[in-house]
Amino acid sequence: MMTDYENVLFENYDGVGLITMNRPQALNALNAATLAELDCLLDDVAKDAAVKVVIITGYGDKAFVAGADITEMRPMSALEGRNFGKSGQRVFNKLENLPQPVIAAVNGFALGGGCELAMACDIRIVSDKAKFGQPEVGLGITPGFAGTQRLARLIGKGRAKELIYTADTINADEAFRIGLVNKVVPAEQLMDAAGTMARKIMSRGAVAVQLSKAAINEGLDVDFESGQAYEAEVFGLCFSTADQKEGMAAFIEKRKAAFLGK
Ligand code: CO8
C-alpha cells in the first residue's frame, strides 16, 4: 500500500482503515491533486484484505471538506469544468462502490463537494458541530460531484431542491431530521462513535456485509425486479461461504459467531 500521499492520510487501526482528508490550509477543499490521491488510495484500499471497514474524516476540528477548491475552479473553461466534474464523479463512484463499508465521520463543514463526498459514503456519523449544504448556486455553478443525484435519492426531491436552490447551510440536527445523516454525537465523541460502529460491522459476516452493500447499491440503479434478482443471486452465494455455516451453527448452539470473512 502506498502511504506517501500529501492531501490524504491513511492508517489501519486493527482492520479499520482511517482516511483523513488533509488540506487544512484550505479547510480540506478538494483540488485536482487531492482527488487524484484519493483515487489512488481507494484503489489500494479496495485491494487490501487487511482493511475491513473504512472511516473517512477531515483533518482538524473545523472542516470535513469545505467543497471543491474554488481558487482552482475559478479560471476553468466550460470544458475544464465538465472534465473536473466528471473526474470527481468517477472518484466518488469508486468510493461508493468500494467493497468495504465506508463510514463518513463528519467533523465540521461538509459543503458542496464535501457534502457530496459524505453522501458517497455508506453511513454518516456526524459531530454536533458539523454543517452541511450545497452552496454551488451561490457561486454560479451547479453541484458537480453528483450532488443533484445523490441528495435527491437520500432526502427526496423536494428537500434536495430546497437545499440546492437556496444554497442554505444546515446544522447537524437539521441534517439528521431530514435524513441526510445517520447519527449526531458530541464533537469529542465522534471518532469513538464511528469506531464503535466500524467494529460492530466488523464483528458480522464480512462476505454478507459486502454482498449486502453491493445489492443495495446495485438495486438503487435498476428496476425493482432486477434488484430482487441480484439479491437472490447474492443470497444464494452466501450458502457457499464458511461464514454462513458458522453463523447458523452459532445460532443453533447459542454462542457468538466467530466469522472468518470467507
Ligand atoms: N476552496 C478553496 N479554498 C477554500 C474553500 C474552498 N471550497 N473553502 C475554504 N477555503 C479556504 C479559504 O479561502 C481560506 O483560505 P485563506 O486562509 O488563504 O484565506 C481558508 O480556507 C479558511 O477559510 P475561511 O477563512 O473562509 O474560514 P471561515 O471559518 O471564515 O469560513 C466556510 C468557513 C464557511 C466553510 C468558508 O470557508 C466557505 O464558505 N468556504 C467555501 C464553501 C463552498 O462554497 N464550497 C462549495 C465549493 S463549490 C463545490 O464544492 C462544487 C463541487 C462540484 C465541483 C464540480 C466541478 C465543476
Image (cartoon, grey):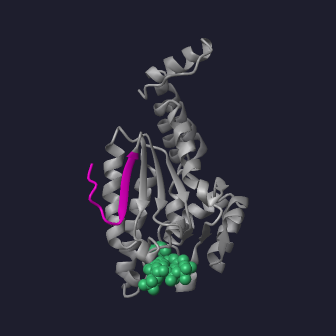
Image side of residue 49 versus residue 104, left or right: left
Residue at (53% x, 67% y) in the render: 61
Residue 115 in sight in this render: yes
Give the mark count: 0
Residue at (65% x, 77% y) in the render: 168
Q: Position of residue 106 (x, y in %)?
A: 55, 60
Name the residue furthest front: 188
Q: Is residue 169 above or below residue 38?
A: below
Give the camera-side residue of 237 and 107: 107
Q: Is residue 45 above or below residue 154?
A: above
Quadrant housing residue 253:
top right
Give the camera-side residue of 62 and 70: 62
Q: Position of residue 140 (x, y in %)?
A: 53, 86
Q: Is residue 163 above or below residue 8?
A: below
Q: What range is drawn magenta here?
A: 1-12
Quadrant housing residue 135:
bottom right
Residue at (51% x, 54% y) in the render: 121
Q: Position of residue 245 (x, y in %)?
A: 50, 17
Residue 141 in sight in this render: no
Name the residue furthest top: 253
Q: Is residue 2 above or below residue 151?
A: above
Q: Position of residue 244 (x, y in %)?
A: 50, 21
Image side of residue 252 versus residue 209, left or right: right
Image side of residue 218 versus residue 22, left or right: right
Q: Does the segment drawn in magenta span residue 254?
A: no
Quadrant housing residue 262:
top left
